[in-house]
Amino acid sequence: MAKPFQVEHARSIAVIVAVAGIILSAVSVPDLLGIATILGDWSWWTFAIGLIMFVIGIYLLIVYLRNVTTFEEMMQQKSKAEFVRNQDDAEYLAWRLPSKFEARLAEKKKEFNIK
């Protein structure tokens, strides 16, 4: 079963949201400083929305990278007993991450002869 778009492309979406937030805020800065009047009365709103988008994008990216790091640590385990002990967590992370991580989990389970 295919994973949702937002799961398969989580890293790209997080980066795009953060960059869009930066751009939106940057467009409103000249208006706020009185250099140009591009947005008029909307400059404070666009700055605030851009800042919120940036924070959300950074948060999404941090969560994604934390999940990937934790998954990578689980895949580095050499002990079968330790892997089996953490198997539920590894499967949950693989479920929350793109499909390639599920494939890596399947390879690790095959390596340890786990069904």
Image (cartoon, rainbow, N blue to C red):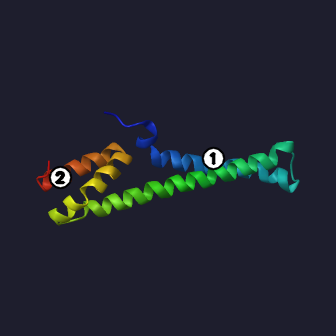
Q: Position of residue 77 (x, y in %)?
A: 22, 65
- Which label lies toward us, 2 or 1? 2
Compared with 34, 8 (above or below) is above
Instruction: Classify mark 1: helix, strand or loop.
Output: helix
Q: Residue at x 49, y 46 (%)?
A: 12
Residue at screen point 61% across, 55% down: 55
Of the numbered discs 2 and 1, the one sitting upstream in the chain is 1
Local crowd size for mark 1, using a 10 Å CA cut-off: few (<14), some (14–19), many (≥20)? some
Q: Residues within 10 Å of mark 2 (few under 14, many from 20)?
A: some
Q: Nearer the viewer, residue 37 or 60?
A: 60
Q: Position of residue 9 (x, y in %)?
A: 44, 43
**Left or right: 3, with 33 as reference point:** left
Mark 2 lies on a secondary structure that is helix
Residue at the image position 81 percent from the left and 47 percent from the top? 43
Residue 11 spot, x, y in % from top left: 46, 49
Q: Which mark is residue 63?
A: none
- Amino acid at pointer 2: Lys
Type of the residue with mark 1: Ala
User: What residue did someone put label 2 on?
Assistant: 109
106 on left or right of 57: left
* Residue 97 in view in this figure: no
- The residue lying at 80 percent from left, 49 percent from top is 44
- Quadrant containing the N terminus is top left
Q: Residue furthest left?
A: 113
Mark number displayed over residue 20: 1
Is 110 left, or right, of 93 in this rendering? left
